[in-house]
Amino acid sequence: MNVVLLGPPGAGKGTQARRLEDGHGMVQLSTGDMLRAAVASGSAIGRQAKDVMEAGQLMPDALMLEMIGARIEEPDCLHGFTLDGFPRTVGQAEGLDRMLAQRGKKLDFVIEMAVDDAALIERIAGRFECCSCGTGYHDTFKRPATKGVCDNCGDTNFRRRADDNAAAVERRLTVFHNQTAPLLPYYEERGILRTVDGMAEIDEVSRQIEAIIESGTSGKA
């Protein structure tokens, strides 16, 4: 089964993609990870990607599609894949459909992880982690039991991502919504768009996604 997860940064796409990979063998395809792997491999696609990145330019859609097309032909994608971070525009979605059709494949579902912007900003902007072991915390939802001391390893040094602040998250959400809004009717017209509550607990989001996957495997999509 082949699925696209749509959702803004912080919605939990990566977590759910990994669960689909573990549970169904649907390989998680993160475009960022694929780009880094292609560059590291020194392949023809990787060399092109490296030139584009070093020039500070946006990656051309054709190159991204070529990279994804090559990746899904690998044996580990036999049971399908979950795309995380692509497509982001209708043009990319159209290109993806054509590329898959050329390979006798298609998307089974596009799953929108719907979020509440204000709640997501609070979720992301409050995150911090232990510098030593990486245990994650939150200003509101998960503070260390002892202030300033990691519950896991006892270290007293913590860090925050530079872009985990309200202003940066708002900008990322604006870009996401502007790019992604047209994708929803595009996939809805094809009858493959499904929506889950991206603000629910992780296990509940997984349960909703599992129900969608099961509806497809049982022929009830």
Image: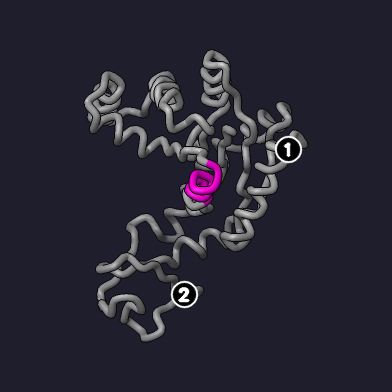
Residue displayed at 40% across by 22% down: 70
The answer to whether residue 203 is left or right of residue 67 is: right
Task: Magenta stretch: give its range.
Answer: 16-24
| Mark 1 element type | loop
Give residue 218's mark: 1
Disc 2 crowd rating (10 Å Cα; few below 14, some 14-19, many 20+) is: few
Q: Main secondary structure of the magenta part?
A: helix
| Mark 2 element type | loop
The x and y percentages for residue 156 are 26, 78
The answer to whether residue 62 is left or right of residue 132 is: right
Residue displayed at 33% across by 33% down: 35
The residue where tag 2 is placed is 142
Give residue 16's mark: none
Residue type beneath disc 1: Ser
Of pointers 1 and 2, the one earlier in the residue sequence: 2
Farthest bottom residue?
146
Compare residues 80 and 174 and report the one nearer the observer: 80
Residue displayed at 73% across by 37% down: 218
Quarter of the rendering containing residue 44: top left
Check the image and report above or below for 214 versus 54. below
